[in-house]
Amino acid sequence: MLASIQEAATTGPTEAALAPHPDRKCIIDTHELRKVYQMGEMEVHALRGVSIQIYEGEMVAIVGPSGSGKSTLMAILGILDVPSAGKYMLDGIEIQQMHEDDLALIRNDRIGFVFQKFNLLSRSTVLDNVILPMIYRGLSKNDRIDRAKQVLEMVGLGDRIHHKPTELSGGQQQRVAIARALANDPALVLADEPTGNLDTKTGEQIMELFHKLNKEQGITIVIVTHDPEVAAQADRIISLRDGLIEADQTTIQHKFPEGDEGDIDEIANEDIPENAVLTVEKGPTDADKTE
Ligand SMILES: Nc1ncnc2c1ncn2[C@@H]1O[C@H](COP(=O)(O)OP(=O)(O)OP(=O)(O)O)[C@@H](O)[C@H]1O
Ligand SMILES: [Mg+2]
C-alpha cells in the first residue's frame, strides 16, 4: 500500500545509479543506442543515443511519455529488433557481432518476455504454453514438464495447469506469461507494460510477484510502465523523453512500522540523496487487519 510518492528534482543520473558495481555483473550495457524508423520521406528518431548499464539482480522501471521510445528500447534489449547505431552487450556478449541463428538462441536462453497483452497461445493449455520455449533446449519431455510445473507453482498456478488461457482471469493469464518467461531460467526478464491490461489490484499482485522473483531469486527485471506506483516499486527508475534518458534515479523505500500512520515530514530530514525518489509506505492500520 503506497501512501504517497515524493519526487525530487530530476536533473540527471544519480551518483548511486552511475556508481560502478565492481562486485556485480553487468547484464545490460548499451552505448549510444540509436533507432531511426524510415516512414516514406520522413525519419522518426525513436532513440537518439541511449547508454545504460543494468546490473545482475536489479529491478529497473523504464518510464516516459507515450512515444518516448520505451518499447523501441525494450525490443532492442530483447533482441527482437536491431539498433540503427550504437553498441549492445548482453550478459557479456556483443550482440552486433553475432550471427542471426545464434541471436535466436541467445534470445530464447537468456531473455524472458512479458507483454501487456499476455501473448499466450489460446488453444494450448497453460502447461503447454510454458513448455513451448523449452522445446529448443534439448531437455527430455519429462524434464520439460517438471520444469513447467515448477515455474507454474512459483507463480501460484499449480492448480490451473490443464486450463486454457481463456478459462483464466487476466491476472492469472499474466502469471502464465511470467511462468513462460521464467521457463528457461533467463538472465533477464523484460516486461513491457505488464500491468497495463489489468485492474489496479490485480496489477499490484503481478508487481508483488515480480518483486518476489527479484528479491528471492535474484532475477534481473526491467519493467516499462506508465504507472508511478508501479515504477516506485523498482530499485531504480530510468525516465525517457524524446528518445533520450532524461533521468536515472534510485528509489528509496521508507516503511513506517506497524500502527504508525506515517508522517512524511518526519523523514524529510533523513539523508536522502539528491535525485532519489522516495516512496513512503504506511504501517498496516487496524482497518487493514480486519480486511
Ligand atoms: N515500427 C515503427 N515504424 C515507425 N515508427 C515507429 C515504429 N515503432 C515506433 N515508432 C515511433 O517511434 C517512437 C517511439 O515509439 P515507442 O513505441 O518506442 O514509444 P513508447 O514510449 O513505447 O510509447 P507508448 O507509451 O505509447 O507505448 C514513436 O514516435 C513511434 O511513432
Ligand atoms: Mg510502448
Image (spheres, rainbow, N blue to C red):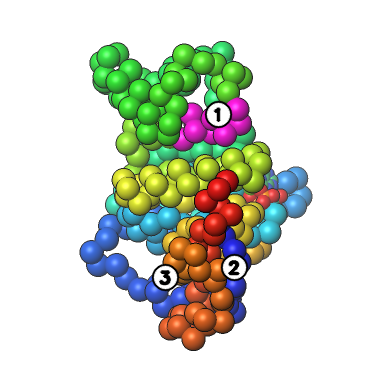
User: Mark 1 against mark 2, which lies toward the viewer?
Assistant: 2
Q: Give the range drawn in magenta.
A: 169-178
Residue at image coords 53%, 64%: 282
Residue at image coords 32%, 48%: 216
Q: Residue 84, percent across and down?
A: 54, 52
What is the number of the mark on residue 5?
2
Mark 2 neighbour density, 10 Å: few (under 14) some (14–19) many (20 or more): some
Residue 154 to residue 75: above or below: above
Displayed quadrant of residue 261 = bottom right
Establish whether ligand 1 lies closer than 8 Å to the Cβ of label 3: no
Q: Nearer the viewer, residue 198 or 254?
A: 254
Residue at the farthest right position: 41
Mark 1 neighbour density, 10 Å: few (under 14) some (14–19) many (20 or more): many
Residue 274 to residue 123: above or below: below
Task: For residue 108, say whether it is visible.
Answer: no
Q: Sequence-wise, which precedes: disc 1 or disc 2?
A: 2
Q: Residue 188, percent across and down?
A: 38, 45
Q: Does the magenta stretch include residue 43?
A: no
Residue type marked 1? Gln
Residue at image coords 54%, 59%: 285
What is the number of the mark on residue 173?
1
Residue 121 to residue 290: above or below: above
Q: Is residue 177 magenta?
A: yes
Secondary structure, mark 1, is: helix
What is the number of the mark on residue 125?
none
Q: Residue 203, percent across and down?
A: 58, 44
In 3D space, how far apart are the residues under numbered discs 1 and 2 (Cα atoms)?
29 Å
Q: Mark 2 and 3 residues: CB-CB less than 8 Å, in contact?
A: no
Displayed quadrant of residue 263 = bottom right
Residue indicated by mark 3: 17
Secondary structure, mark 3, is: helix
